[in-house]
Image: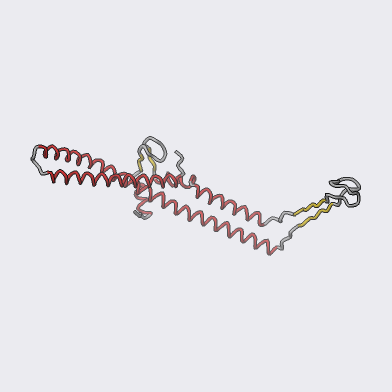
Amino acid sequence: MKYCIKTVIALQALFCLTLGQSSLFAQVPQTLRLQEAEERMATANLQVIAAKYGTEASRGAIVQAGLMPNPNIALEQSAFNARTGEIFRFAGDDASNTEVALQQLILTAGKRDAAIALAITTAETSELAVQELLRGLHYAVRSNLVDLYFTREAIAFYDSSLTGVRKTVQAAERMYSQRTILLSEVLRLKSLLFTLENERLGLVSTADTLQGALRLLLRDTI
């Protein structure tokens, strides 16, 4: 079931989603509005959180690209002193040979500017990816909430209708016991009741699936 953004915004003004005992947020009936769900998704969804951390890391890479690379220091100490025959003598006049090497990478201005430009491009790309992710998740939250609302409305309609059908079947069975109607009529009504009950079970399964998707999108922990 697909809905355009304008339709969803209009629906947001017209209704709120009431959740029952299997609510997303508690074991008591609560109200979840589209805007509230979107705000929670933007702050709690694990994909969004990870993407935002990646963006922050990309921004930090811009600063790092403008800094001078850290120097590398290497220390080499001989364990055996060939002159004295001693081992592990690291101090004194007869200490083993010690070598210290210092390396410093020096980038020219052009290379540093290129590294900064690349880091900026990477950060901008990361920010655009976050925005695209948010757009997709916003649509998923909206469509799932709207689908769940109408699915629950359909379940409520079936519940009210099944009450009347069950009463009709019971009345038909009494009439059949009195031989006032044919058995085929009773069976036809029972078949209708069975079909409606199966359809309702299908809607309940759909509602559970939608709720599971929303729990994942909104990072529900209850």
In the rendered image, the residue lying farthest to the front is: 85
Q: Is residue 57 left or right of residue 107?
A: left
Instruction: Name the image colouring.
Output: secondary structure
Residue at horizontal 88 percent and vertical 52 percent from the top: 82
Horizontal placement of 166 versus 108: left or right? left
Residue 75, how many percent across, how many down?
A: 79, 52
Q: Residue 19: x, y in percent?
A: 36, 40
- The one of 157 and 77 positioned closer to us in this rendering: 77
Pick the front one: 113 or 220: 220
Which residue is nearer to you in this view: 199 or 53?
Answer: 199
Which residue: 39% across, 35% down? Answer: 27
Number of numbered discs on residues: 0
Percent position of residue 20, x then y: 35, 38
Please indicate whether residue 195 sits to the left or right of residue 11 in the image: left
Q: Quadrant of the C terminus?
A: top left
Residue extending furthest toward the top: 28
- At horizontal 36% and vertical 37% (from top left) the residue drawn is 21
Please tell me in which quadrant of the rendered image residue 68 appears.
bottom right
- Quick check: 58 above or below 160? below
Quadrant of the frame with the N terminus: bottom left
User: Measured from the top left, where is residue 199 in percent x and y?
Assistant: 27, 47
